[in-house]
Amino acid sequence: MNANELRREILEHYIDKYGFVSLNPNPDDSHVEANAMLYTSQAYFLFELLGMLSNADISRFVDNIVKLTVKPGLYMRYPTLPNMLEAHDNYVGILSFCKLLQNNGFYVLYPYQIYSWGNSHKIPWFIGLPYYNNINPEKFDIKCMRQGSVWGFTRYCAEKNMGITCGLWLIGDIICSMFSNHTSTKILSMMKLQVLKKKNFIFKTLNWLFYKKVDIEKTVNTYYGENSPFAKMFIKCKDILKSAL
């Protein structure tokens, strides 16, 4: 299948009743997706890399965020999961996709809102790391704390200085993912690196090293399945992902 056919397959067979992208084909009304924004962001991220993202896709993405917003910059996992704590990977999906689109005029609104929420909800006794508690927004919960790597990436996507500590933490996190058995962490690193490599020579070099170690085809086929349109689209993007540009 060519890229347009894969895009059509995702839009026609992998969108659930709330408008989120699922990894499972033809999701029925009982479908629940805890990583809804991650998979939605990944799909549109791939569309953009292949030059196929439409205004309708962006409108759906914005509508998806509205459905999950607890407060600006603070999201729940899924419309029917308001009492499940959100996880950082959904945020990484949103941040990566938005940062990828900035050169196309897509506003930095959502990364800035995510940054602003975190900046006003920090843990002062632990190097100022933020927490994102979507169940009880003003209450600190250790399970809602963001690691320095994610906070550094958030700051970068919101056009803020990521800071030396968080920057080193982010680099270390990506290097660790290269050697991890968890394919999901490798895919998150792929998304991060696609926008980080535009920052400076350090991240360009890290992108080169990452793909010297990580086999894109093996990673995405293991995570999504060889017949998945998501895996096939990632493979079509492999030269773009490996590029220094």
Image (spheres, grey):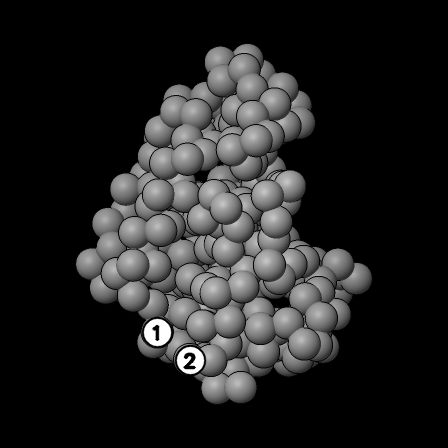
Report the front residue among 173 and 140: 140
| Residue 85 on image: x %, y % | 62, 28
Q: Residue at x 49, y 13 (%)?
A: 138
Q: Which residue is mark 2?
A: 4
Q: Nearer the viewer, mark 1 or mark 2?
A: 2
Q: Position of residue 127 (x, y in %)?
A: 54, 28
Residue 143 vs residue 67, the one in the foreground: 67
Instruction: Answer with the quarter of the image where residue 223 lies.
Output: bottom right
Using the image, determine if residue 152 lies above or below residue 171: above
Which amino acid, by three-letter code, is at mark 2?
Asn
Q: Residue at 24% across / 49% down in the picture? A: 107
Q: Is residue 165 visible?
A: no
Q: Residue at x 29, y 66 (%)?
A: 54
Name the residue nearer the viewer: 113 or 39: 39
Residue 141, position as x, y percentages in the image? 63, 19
Residue furthest to the front in view is: 29
- Asked if marks 1 and 2 touch (Cβ < 8 Å), the reply is yes
Residue 110 position in % (x across, y down): 34, 41
Q: Which mark is residue 165?
A: none
Amino acid at circle 1:
Met
